[in-house]
Structures are given as C-alpha cells and as structure tokens.
Image (tube, grey):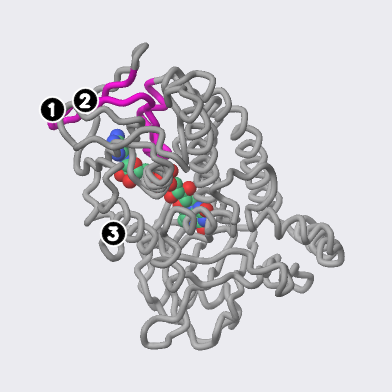
Amino acid sequence: MTAPSSPTPDSASDRRDLVILGGGLVGMTLALAAARAGITSHVVERADPADLTAEGVDGRASAISTASWNLFSNIGLGEALAPLGCPIDAIAVTDGMKPGRIDFRPTLEEGSLGRMFANRDIRLALFAAARDEPAIAWHTGVEPVRRDRHAHGVTVTLDNGRVLDGSLLVGAEGRRSPTRDEEGITQVAWDYHHRAIVAGLSHELPHGNTAWEIFYPEGPFALLPLIDDDQGRHRSALVWTVSERDAKGVLALSDATFLAEVARHMAGLFGAIELSAPRMSFPLSYQNATRLTGPRLALVGDAAHGMHPIAGQGLNLGLRDVGALVEVLGDGMRLGLEPGDAQLLARYERWRSLDIFTVMSVMDGIVRLFGVPGKLPSAARRLGMGAVQRMPTLKRFFMNEARGMSGKLPALLQV
Ligand SMILES: Cc1cc2nc3c(=O)[nH]c(=O)nc-3n(C[C@H](O)[C@H](O)[C@H](O)COP(=O)(O)OP(=O)(O)OC[C@H]3O[C@@H](n4cnc5c(N)ncnc54)[C@H](O)[C@@H]3O)c2cc1C
C-alpha cells in the first residue's frame, strides 16, 4: 500500500491525519492499522500504559474471531501473539448442563472458531508495536480539555497545555465517550442490571480447546479455554453473569466459597478447580450510538456500540470498525481526499451501521431468550437447541458468525 502522507517529527505543530482519543484495544489497533497504511495519528490515552498492562488490572480474556486474527496478523502482531492464543476448536452451548446441548465443532478443513487471548497480552503486543512506529505519536497520562472541529481540521487541547492538530477526530474512549456526547450523538441504551464476574481458573482436566456457554436463568456462565500456564496447569477464563443484586454478595464471598459456587455451576466438567487470577466485575448494558460520524468525526469500538459479552463479540465488532475505517480513509486519500472528508465518513457510516445493528440485536436477543426463568421456557430452549443441533446448515451459519467471516469484510480482516 502506498503511504498517503508521511509522519513528521512529534513537535508542537505536528499535524497528523488522525487524532484518536482513547488508546484502548480498539483505539490502539486503529492507530497501528492506520500506520501500516501510511496514515499518521496522535493517540491520546488518559491512563498510563504501565497501569493498563499491570497484572490484575484487566483480568479479562477475549475470544478473537478468525477475521480479527487476520487483522492482527496483517498489522504485524501475528508473531508476538500466536504463541499466546488458545484455539477454540469447539463451542458447547447448554441450558444449565441439561441434556439437549448444541456442539459447534467445525471440521479440520473449516478451521477453528477463533482464539482466546488474555487482554493483557493483546495490550502488551499493541503497545510494543506502537512504541516503534513513527507514524503514531502516543500521548499518555493526559486528557483532552477541549476538542475543536473546523473547516480545515481538528484541534485537541490536552490538560498539559499541548495542542494537537489533525484532519479527523476519532472517538475511541469506550462506553463513556465524551467525544460522542459532546457531538450530541444519542444512544439507544438500556441496563441489563447484571454484572459479569470475571476470574481465572486452573483445573485438573484439560478443556480440549472447547468454550462452554452454560445458560442459567440467573445469567450465562461461560468457560473460555486458555493455554496452559508455564507449569503445565490447564486454565480457563470464567465469565459469570449475575444480577446486580447478587453481584456484591458474590464478590464478597471468600475464595473457597466462591470456588465451591463455581464448581457447582460446572458440575464437575474439568475436575478440581483453583483460582488462578483474582475476581473482578463489569456492569452490563446495551449502548448503540444512533450515528457513527459527525463533521470530521468518527466513532469506533465501544464508544459506538457496547454490548453484553454473551458471545464475545464486542471487541470483534470494534476491530471491524477499524478495518473499515482504515480502508475507507486509505482509498480516499489515494484519490487525493483528506481523512476528514465528509464523503469518506458517509461511506464508513453506511458500511458499518448494518453490521453493528445486526450483531447488537442478535446478542440482545440471545440475552433475553436465555434469561427467561421457569421450566417451560427452559424446555422450549432445549427443544430449539436440539433442532439446531440436527441442522448442519444452521450450525455452519452460526459458526461463520463466530468466526466473523460473514458480510462485507474489510480487506484487513481477510487472509
Ligand atoms: C466481561 C467482558 C468480557 C468480554 N469478552 C469479550 C470477548 O471475548 N470478545 C470480544 O470481542 N469482546 C469482549 N468484550 C468486549 C470488549 O472487551 C470491548 O468491546 C472492548 O474492550 C472495547 O474496547 P475499546 O478500546 O473500544 O474501549 P475500552 O476498552 O473502554 O478503551 C477505552 C480507552 O479510552 C481511554 N479513555 C477513556 N476516556 C478517555 C478520555 N477522556 N481521554 C483519553 N482516554 C480516555 C480509557 O482509559 C481506555 O484505555 C468483553 C467485555 C466484557 C465486559
């Protein structure tokens, strides 16, 4: 790919193509993907990278779809990340461990359903690559105090007095994006009144690279396979959804009582279990921005769409935003347009809106379908799951969705 513009030294008057606010998983992937396409950026992150990557700060692990893995490989992270990912060879879905489950197990030729990575490992790889990339000017431990967008560009004033210039402002600050709110972009939003309790488990029996999604009326209970630790212990990431009402109690349980509760939900699946990483919790809500763009502004990642982690799709959706935005900007800049051009933003909006709406709606539907308590809904679910289990075409459709390979994929997410 030719470089639409070349980086200039990081000086006070350093105008860059993008000013990305928020250097989390999505913001930093965008900066790196843009850099690989010759698009320069300022990235503003209020946290210190050392804090973001400290052990126990983000104990989550992410299911990275095949398409998202292609993106990481295409921007040069494949070598660093490959040994750290655990392939997901199968997904087992059950209604409370009762009979009638669905097994999604692709053939060898079809390949795995994605890979599990500790978020910390993804961040470490992204940050190491960003440090060596002259097309990225990374401003950490600072926050914008003012954002201005005008006919010829955007200007962001930081709380240390520094002023950053660019052509396009990108809001990547996650669910509470001040950039989105300042532009007056409203959201369709509701609270699930649930919390995801996240913890690391080590266990006696191997997980066989299978991800388990066990639905209980109180909320889904997911076990996601991780690679063995350096002492050969088998590990999985737990994401256990409980009601907001119960979350405080679950978090306050002693380790032993917590483990006993987890073991009860697992019904002996992996033998004896131990805690390998501390518990933490995340509130769960649905937040869908009513538009993704404004004059010289684009939203990416959770700033645009925050969803229930029931099928591990939030980051994957954000990475599709990244691929689409970089492609649209790269195409436009090669034609002589500048990154803040309204036509390019309109193309980005058109490209991403339907995919976002579809994935968000399906995830919300699953949360509601499996959240209905009672024997009758449970029996109906198992009947439905039994039907899916016997329909290979439908199963293949769901597996393609899990891989993130359906719809019009940006080039960066293809092999
Ligand atoms: C329990 C749980 C499990 C999940 N599992 C999966 C999974 O398996 N697969 C998957 O695809 N997704 C998963 N997700 C979703 C995924 O974690 C999110 O979609 C993803 O982290 C969003 O990344 P982001 O960079 O858009 O936002 P964030 O991660 O929220 O990052 C935003 C960044 O912006 C910074 N920031 C905020 N405000 C400012 C400001 N004013 N100025 C400067 N910087 C600012 C923050 O410090 C942060 O670094 C899960 C989510 C949860 C809660």
| Viewer can see residue 406 | yes
Residue 81 is situated, as x and y percent measured from the top left of the image, at 42, 66
Which SS class for mark 2? strand
Q: Residues within 10 Å of mark 3 (few under 14, many from 20)?
A: some
Circles 3 and 1: CB atoms closer than 8 Å:
no
Residue 395 picture quarter? bottom right
Which residue bears the numbered disc 2?
157
Q: Is residue 84 magenta?
A: no
Which residue bears the numbered disc 1?
161
Q: Quadrant of the C terminus?
A: bottom right
| Viewer can see residue 195 | no
Which SS class for mark 3? loop
Q: What segment is highlighted magenta in the picture?
A: 153-182
Which residue bears the numbered disc 3?
53
- In this rendering, which labeled residue sits more in front, label 2 or label 3? 2
Q: Which amino acid type is marked by label 2? A: Thr
Residue 299 horizontal side relative to residue 354, left or right:
left
Q: Which amino acid type is marked by label 1? A: Gly
In 3D space, how far apart are the residues under numbered discs 3 and 1 (Cα atoms)? 27 Å
349 or 109, nearer to the observer: 109
